[in-house]
Amino acid sequence: MSTSITARGRALRLVYVYVAAAAAVIALAAVLLSFSGFSVANAADAAWRGAFGSADAVLSSTLVRSIPFMLLGTAVALAFRVGVFNIGGDGQFLIGAALATSVALAPWSMPGWVHLILALGAGAAGGALWGLIPALLRRRWGVFEVLSTLMMNFVAVHVISYLVRGPLQEPTRIYPQSSTFAEGVRLPSVLDGTRLHVGIYLAIVICVLGWIWLFSRESGLRARLTGANPIAAESAGRIDTARTSFRVFIVSAALCGLAGSVEVLGVTFALYENLSPGYGFVGVAVALLAALHPLGVLASAVVLAAIDAGAGAMQRDAGIPSVTAWAVQALLVLAVLAGRALVNRARAQDVPRTPVTA
Amino acid sequence: MDWVTALLEATVRAATPLALAALGELLIERGGQINIGLEGSVLAGALGAAIVAEPLGAHAGLLGGAAAGALIGALFAVFTIALRTDQIITGTALTLLVLGTTGALARTLFSERGIALTLPMLPVNPIPGLQSIPVLGPALFAQPYIAYFAVLLAIGIHWWLTRTHAGLALRAVGESRENARVAGIQVDRVQWAAVLVGSLLAGISGAVLVLAQSGTFVEGMSAGRGFIAIAIVALGRWRPLPVLLAALLFGATTAAQYTAQTFGWTMPYQVFLAAPYLATLIVLFLSARRLSPASLSQRGPSLA
């Protein structure tokens, strides 16, 4: 955004922040592991093999996990850019997954790819619908979206709990989950023999489209101005900030719903409870590490997915609890937050701040 | 009318930790912050209580929970107050951090023994006289002392907010940091205090889950109660006594779920569970921004 001569200096300082944050987190993780009596060498070895060590690890583990992270990360990045704190990613993800499931299980005779596109569309529509309520509450009545989206998450969890024990339960009525989708309504894999499905293309396209829209389209500029300073955008820029943030809110929610549909159509092939182990939160972490930049989301989604995949392998091979992944992801976010805050503070003392830094 | 007593008793039991966490979040929000990391404080409090209670007993466990909750609060304050990071992102990251850390710690500390962890629990402290009131007595006045503490705390916070200079200072900061600063209030110090005390209460809330309800520690056992507390604060419109009632409502829906199942009602029990969140949404809609502390929804410094 900023075209001033300090832009390169800023980018360089950001690189320092990320390197320092990564080094700090790795050092801290090593200290904690050895303190808990684990071999750091074994752990590092297992983590590397689990995340990047083989083609299968990269394709079937890391990249598969990165797909929902990319979509949710883009959703959060766009929303936060415009000043909408959509932390309802979990709920929108679940409702998207539920609608996609009901479409995927519908006994329609049509080509598989048409059925798939309908199911994906249903997912996006479901997410948008779930986001519509907090978006309307915000636009018309000024209800703070952090609270309303949080409520919608809980309601969604109970809706799913009802659906998998009611209308969408599998026919034997034993397990709280839906039937498994037919072969034709599953996202095909990119390479035979791997679990990597074509959702990866969709996710990458969405990130790139988000980048183009945000930085090369007039409405994207309006969104950034609204997020940077709504009062100035309204008075000096003649931007309808309420409408701008409402629209971005809905798009963000639709992307979360799309993520849910991609997950059921590409990975689980069925709807069940606990489909989202806190994906909404991971989306916030992805977006923050990416500095709310849609292309950065591509990278940070892969990094956080690799941490997940590596932790899975650490549990199998070195006996280290896989939940450690969350702690490492969180530490990375906190380290970057702290690093950026310190850099910004130093910058504020020597360079006068430009009004739009986003 | 046995089931009425059972329902009421279960309601109060479920509501106690919710009320404690919500009163904590109320203090934080009245000071103009919103702490999504409260969930982390509740969970940390549960683990802290488990670690301390095992060798030292249930009462010490409460203190352990309080300390663990306050520790997470201190992290939140360092980031959001000292470093001025975004509250939503910081709180989210802290909750994630605690989920991961407590999970790993619990597995290394407890699960290698091969037997389920059994912890000392808080005894019930019946209030003489009151407990023999028919129906209500055994439900309301035969609870662990921490339940009575929650009620007294709500009254105390109400008094403190409305009748003391310190309470006024907290509310002033919540309405406008700038104006409060001009009026000579040390804004950062007030917010630090609110976050620490609020998170300490959230830690006690987690301790209550362990020491008065389950008697063990389970990974992720806070199960969203920190977030529910945020809902309760909104439902109670940022006032201590209505917040106490809102906590009872949320407790009642948990209790009603089991009662409904016992009676074999055909209504999906998820309706009960979802109802308080819908009620909160409706209250948010009816009261909109008017009654929440003004600076709560203002943006922090630029995120990108």
Image (cartoon, rainbow, N blue to C red):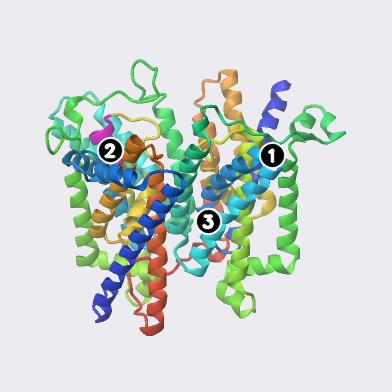
Find the distance from the CA under tag 1 to the CA under tag 2.
44 Å
Q: Is residue A10 positioned above or below A104 on the image? A: below
Find the distance from the CA under tag 3 to the CA under tag 2.
30 Å
Q: Do discs 1 and 3 belong to a common subunit?
A: yes
Q: Which residue is mark 2?
A: A263
Q: Amino acid at mark 3?
A: Asn
Which mark's residue is nearer the viewer, 1 or 3? 1
SS for callout 2: helix
Q: Is residue B215 left or right of residue A281?
A: right
- Which residues lie in the magenta part? A257-269
Q: Amino acid at mark 1?
A: Ala
SS for callout 3: loop
Q: Residues within 10 Å of mark 1 (few under 14, many from 20)?
A: many
Q: Do discs 1 and 2 belong to a common subunit?
A: no
Q: In what quadrant of the picture does the N terminus of chain B appear?
A: top right
Q: Is residue A231 left or right of residue B164?
A: left
Q: Tell me the chain of label 3.
A: B
**Which quadrant of the structure image shows residue B254?**
top right
Q: Which residue is mark 1?
A: B58
| Residue A308 position within the rendered picture, expressed as x and y whole percent measured from the top left | 32, 44
Q: How many marks?
A: 3
Marks 1 and 3, the one that precedes in the sequence:
3
* Residue A267 on the magenta span: yes
Q: Which residue is mark 3?
A: B35
> Residue at horizontal 50%, vertical 53%?
B36
Asked if disc 3 and disc 2 are in contact, CB closer than 8 Å, the reply is no
Q: Amino acid at mark 2?
A: Glu
